Structures are given as C-alpha cells and as structure tokens.
C-alpha cells in the first residue's frame, strides 16, 4: 500500500502516463471523463492500488470533482478484475478445473466490464462536457527531478497519515469480526441452494484456501457428485463470500484512508452494491437453469 501510494505520487508529478491517454480518449470523451481518470484507469491494469491512490490525489488536488472521482474509482474495478484474473486466479484455477475455470474467469471479468460500462453511462448522464476539458499544467515546463520527488514524498506522507489514523483502526475491526467467526457462519445459511452437502462444504474452504477448494471441486466432478453447472454455482457462491470479506478487510480500510470516511462510504456503497448485485444475478440465473 505504501509503495503504491508513493508510485502514484511519482507518476503524477512526472506525468508518466500522460502520453497513454489517447488510447482511452474516445471512451472518456463520450463518458465526459477527464484525462486524469484515463491515466488512473490505464494504470489500474498494472497496479490497481496505485490507480486508486492516483484518483485520490487528483481528487484531493481538485483536478477532478467528486462525481468523477466516484464514478472513475468504481470503474477501475474492470482493469482490477483483469489484473486479478491474470495474476492470481488464472494460474491456479485453469490447471485444476480446465473449462470450468475458464467459464468462472469469464463471468468474473464480465462482472467488472458491466460495472465499468455502467459508470461510463452514468458519467455521460451526470457529468457535463466542461468536465471533460483537459487543463494542462505548465504545458512544456521542464520537470525538476529533485523538486518532483520531494513533492511526491510530501503528498505520500499526507495520505499515509490518514491511512494510519483511519484505515488501520478499520482494518483491525474487520479482522476482529473475522476472528469472531462472522464469515464462518455465512455458509450455514445457504441450505436453500440446490447444492449437495459436499459442494456446500467447498464454499467455506474457498474462503480459507482457494487452491484446496478448486482441487476438492475437481474431485467432486470426477466422481460424478456434481456436474458443470453445480460446480460453477459453487464457485460463484464462494466468490460472493470472498468478495464480501475482501471489501470489508481491504477496500473499506484502504478507501477510508485515502478518500476519507464520507467519500469512501459512497465509493464502497456503489462499487460493492454493483459487484455483489451482479454476482447474485449470475447465481440466480444459474439456479433457474438447473
């Protein structure tokens, strides 16, 4: 987190990503987003944490307004899903589950794509064209390396102070809830799902050890206890709980630290509502197909 914030500040000061903006210019133009949001959006494909930190810095420096900060930060969920799918999920799930893993990844990425699309549509409806104008800062002025690095460190320290004061206590509270067994009790309420007991047992396992859950699910398919649809439904149910825990233990503390409590609640409410809501719709669609 510290590294991401520092890299974000350095990238902003040196305008590293400015020349990449034309790639997303047409989409951003139609969504009435500024190039600042485009820079963060592109950055998220390589480092989601850095991208969110950039959005916070742009917002704190009044380069973008609250509406755009909210919409663009939620839209970053799409490049983040691409990053997580390629870096973390695909290397473990595809070798074990094959086509089932590919289908799950496709739904995972689709979720992020729909969220981003909805944010772009909302941007076109809620932001005015004047919000899309780019005001260059000291156009061709030469960047003094020492001064830029100093400003980067200073702005990073300001964010880190807020994280220590806000994000750290929120993180502690979240992990206390986990230790009290809040998430352990959730699978017990899934008895209404058309899943055999063996499949229901995989859901809490996905919270504890995803690789173990994938292997167990593959074994259940091999012996014929569950079929492709039931296995995909099991993965989605597990993903719903994993996402909920991730939002509480990671996003809420992090966003609270860099955006402040009021703005972070708005971002988390929209982001989590859409992500979890889309996952629930996918689950219900699968249940209807069974």
Image (cartoon, rainbow, N blue to C red):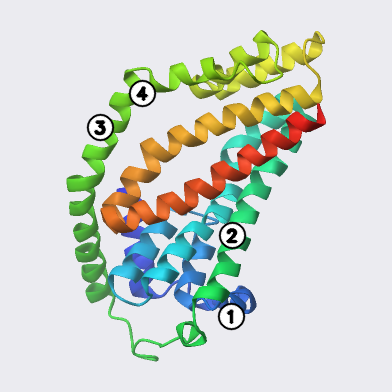
Closer to the camera in the image, 16 or 247: 247
- Residue 41 image offset from top left, x and y in percent: 52, 64
Q: Which residue is at 51% across, 23% downward?
A: 207
The numbered mark, 4 or 1, whose residue comes first in the sequence reads 1
The numbered mark, 3 or 4, whose residue comes first in the sequence reads 3
Query: Real-space Cα distance between discs 2 and 1?
Result: 15 Å
Q: Toward which corner of the image does residue 16 lie, by quadrant?
A: bottom left
- Which quadrant: the C terminus? top right
| Rendered view: 258 above or below 217 | below
- Residue 117 image offset from top left, x and y in percent: 63, 62
Q: Which residue is at 34% across, 66% downward?
A: 10
Query: Real-space Cα distance between discs 4 and 1?
Result: 43 Å
Density class for disc 2 (Cα within 10 Å; few <14, some 14-19, many ≥20) is many
The numbered mark, 3 or 1, whose residue comes first in the sequence reads 1
Residue 172 disc label: 3
Q: Which residue is mark 2?
A: 116
The numbered mark, 3 or 2, whose residue comes first in the sequence reads 2
Q: Which residue is mark 1?
A: 29
Query: Real-space Cα distance between discs 2 and 4?
Result: 30 Å
């Amino acid at each position: 987190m510290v590294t991401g914030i520092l890299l974000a500040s350095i990238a902003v000061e040196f305008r590293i990503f400015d020349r990449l903006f034309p790639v997303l210019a047409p989409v951003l133009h139609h969504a009435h987003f500024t190039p600042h949001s485009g820079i963060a959006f592109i950055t998220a494909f390589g480092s989601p944490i850095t991208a969110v930190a950039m959005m916070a810095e742009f917002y704190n420096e009044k380069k973008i307004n609250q509406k755009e900060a909210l919409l663009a930060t939620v839209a970053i969920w799409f490049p983040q899903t691409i990053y997580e799918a390629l870096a973390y999920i695909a290397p473990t799930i595809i070798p074990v589950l094959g086509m089932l893993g590919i289908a799950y990844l496709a739904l995972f990425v689709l979720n992020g794509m729909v969220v981003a699309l909805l944010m772009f549509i909302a941007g076109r409806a809620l932001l005015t064209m004047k919000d899309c104008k780019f005001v260059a800062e000291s156009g061709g002025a030469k960047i003094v390396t020492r001064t830029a690095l100093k400003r980067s460190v200073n702005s990073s320290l300001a964010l880190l102070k807020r994280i220590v004061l806000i994000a750290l206590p929120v993180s502690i509270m979240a992990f206390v809830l986990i230790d009290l067994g809040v998430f352990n009790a959730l699978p017990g309420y899934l008895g209404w799902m058309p899943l055999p007991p063996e499949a229901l047992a995989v859901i809490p396992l996905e919270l504890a050890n995803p690789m173990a859950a994938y292997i167990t699910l593959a074994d259940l398919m091999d012996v014929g206890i569950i079929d492709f649809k039931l296995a995909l439904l099991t993965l989605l149910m597990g993903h719903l709980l994993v996402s909920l825990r991730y939002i509480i233990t990671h996003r809420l503390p992090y966003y609270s630290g860099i955006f402040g409590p009021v703005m972070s609640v708005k971002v988390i409410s929209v982001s989590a509502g859409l992500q979890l809501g889309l996952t629930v719709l996918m689950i219900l669609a699968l249940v209807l197909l069974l």
